[in-house]
């Protein structure tokens, strides 16, 4: 099986596209199959947070593009920006991955958190979309204040 050993950025047409959800975009080593059937082994030197649009360099020089899969999410909104900031604080206090936009928050679908958001006064709706939450406070991606 051909190996992908590096993350690059390319404007060239990829040999394939691999569509991955948020959890599956945090990997070091795993067998994957592109949407067109091309199978490869992701074999990176360390765990990395793959982003929508990243390219994985195959050992034969071709590359595979990463696409963020649509997944069940919740969109939390408020008519008051300060209220939305308070809601974001409560989400962060629970260490939940959250994608922050100027007028809404996106979180993974969870009925308990949806109830909390509603009780805090947010309007909550469900949708299917790619999930690209904020990275860690101390570096890029899903990092903390220590090495993994």
Image: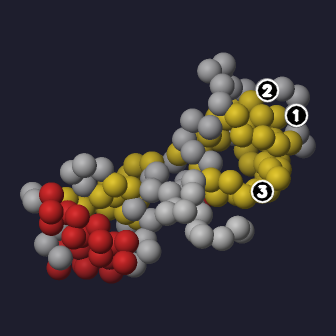
Q: Residue drawn 45% across and 65% down?
A: 97
**Left or right, residue 109 beside residue 103:** right
Tell me the element at label 1: loop
Q: Position of residue 141 (x, y in %)?
A: 57, 55
Report if the CB atoms under discs 2 and 3 are less than 8 Å apart.
Answer: no
Tell which circle, 3 or 1, labels the residue nearer the N-terminal end. 3
Question: Badge 1, how many Cα within 10 Å: few under 14, some, many 20+?
Answer: few
Q: Residue drawn 50% across and 57% down?
A: 135
**Which residue carries the number 1 mark?**
59
Residue at mark 3 to residue at mark 1: CA–CA distance: 17 Å
| Quadrant in the picture for residue 126 | bottom left
Extreme top residue here?
A: 12
Residue 62's disc number: 2
Residue at mark 1 to residue at mark 2: CA–CA distance: 7 Å
Q: Position of residue 114 (x, y in %)?
A: 28, 73
**Which residue carries the number 3 mark?**
46
The reply to whether residue 35 is visible in this rendering is: no
Q: Position of residue 117 (x, y in %)?
A: 23, 73
């Amino acid at each position: 099986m051909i190996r992908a050993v590096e993350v690059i950025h390319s404007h060239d047409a990829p040999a394939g596209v691999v569509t991955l959800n948020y959890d599956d975009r945090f990997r070091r080593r795993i067998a994957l199959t592109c949407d067109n059937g091309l199978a490869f082994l992701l074999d990176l030197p360390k765990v990395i947070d793959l982003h929508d649009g990243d390219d994985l360099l195959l050992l034969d020089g071709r590359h595979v593009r990463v696409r963020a899969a649509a997944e069940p999410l919740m969109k939390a909104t408020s008519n008051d920006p300060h209220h939305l900031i308070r809601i974001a604080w409560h989400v962060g206090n629970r260490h939940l991955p959250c994608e922050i936009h100027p007028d809404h928050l996106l979180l993974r679908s969870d009925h308990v958190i949806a109830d909390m958001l509603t009780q805090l006064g947010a309007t909550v709706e469900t949708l299917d979309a790619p999930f690209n939450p904020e990275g860690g406070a101390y570096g890029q991606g899903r990092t903390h204040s220590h090495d993994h």
